[in-house]
Amino acid sequence: MRSWLRVGEEALFFDQPVIDQRHGFQSASEVATQVPERQDLVRAALLHDLGKRRSRLNVFGRSVVSGLAKVGLRWLVGREGGRGDLYLRHGELAAEELSDVGAEPLVVAFARSHHAARPAEIEPSIWEILVSADR
């Protein structure tokens, strides 16, 4: 796995809770079996959720925040910059951090958009591989 990470990315990855490291590793492993020649896609799968660590929410807290947001009660999540807000913005936060360490544009774009619509810079077939691995 360390060979998948570039300078600056390793510290971000290992700063995550083990549960998020495990999910990233599982997602990256699935991508690596499908397109082993595309290390950028493997890194995108490995690092897409690293913004979650900023919220410091446990599994129960994450579930509550996600459920409230899904039923249109985002306002119950808490103040801007609070733990619930940080969790819901984890993709945006991950994208900022990845950009800061020089990650490839595709890695940054997937982190930012993995819970949203496919960005134009990611081909539909590539997007499907990454989103499928994230499930």
Image (cartoon, rainbow, N blue to C red):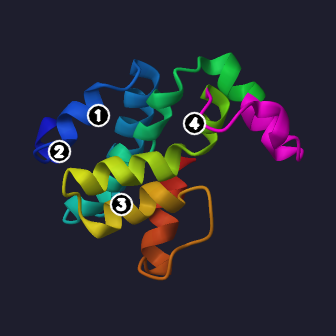
Badge 4, how many Cα within 10 Å: few under 14, some, many 20+?
many
Dot placed on the residue nearer the N-terminal end, 1 or 2: 2
Residue hosting label 1: 13
Q: What's the magenta region?
A: 65-82
Real-space Cα distance between discs 1 and 2? 9 Å
Q: Quadrant of the N terminus?
A: top left
Query: Label 2, on which residue?
Result: 5
Q: Residues within 10 Å of mark 3 (few under 14, many from 20)?
A: many
- For badge 4, the amino acid type reads Leu
Disc nearer the start of the sequence (3/2): 2
Task: Name the residue rendered at 52%, 43% in the picture.
Answer: 90
**96 is higher (above) or lower (below) than 21:** below
C-alpha separation, residue under disc 3 versus residue under disc 2: 14 Å
- First in sequence: mark 3 or mark 4? 4
Q: Earlier in the sequence, mark 4 or mark 1?
A: 1
Location of residue 64 in the rendering, given as x and y in whole percent from the top left corner: 77, 26
> Measured from the top left, where is residue 78 in percent x and y?
74, 30
Mark 3: which amino acid? Val
Mark 4 and mark 1 in contact? Answer it, CB < 8 Å: no
Q: Which residue is mark 3?
A: 108
Q: Amino acid at mark 1?
A: Phe
Q: Is residue 6 above or below residue 55?
A: below
Find disc 4 in the rendering and name its residue: 86
Which of the two discs, 3 and 2, sits closer to the camera? Answer: 3
122 with respect to 9 (left or right):
right
Amino acid type indicated by mark 2: Leu
In the structure shown, which secondary structural element does the residue marked by tag 3 occupy? helix
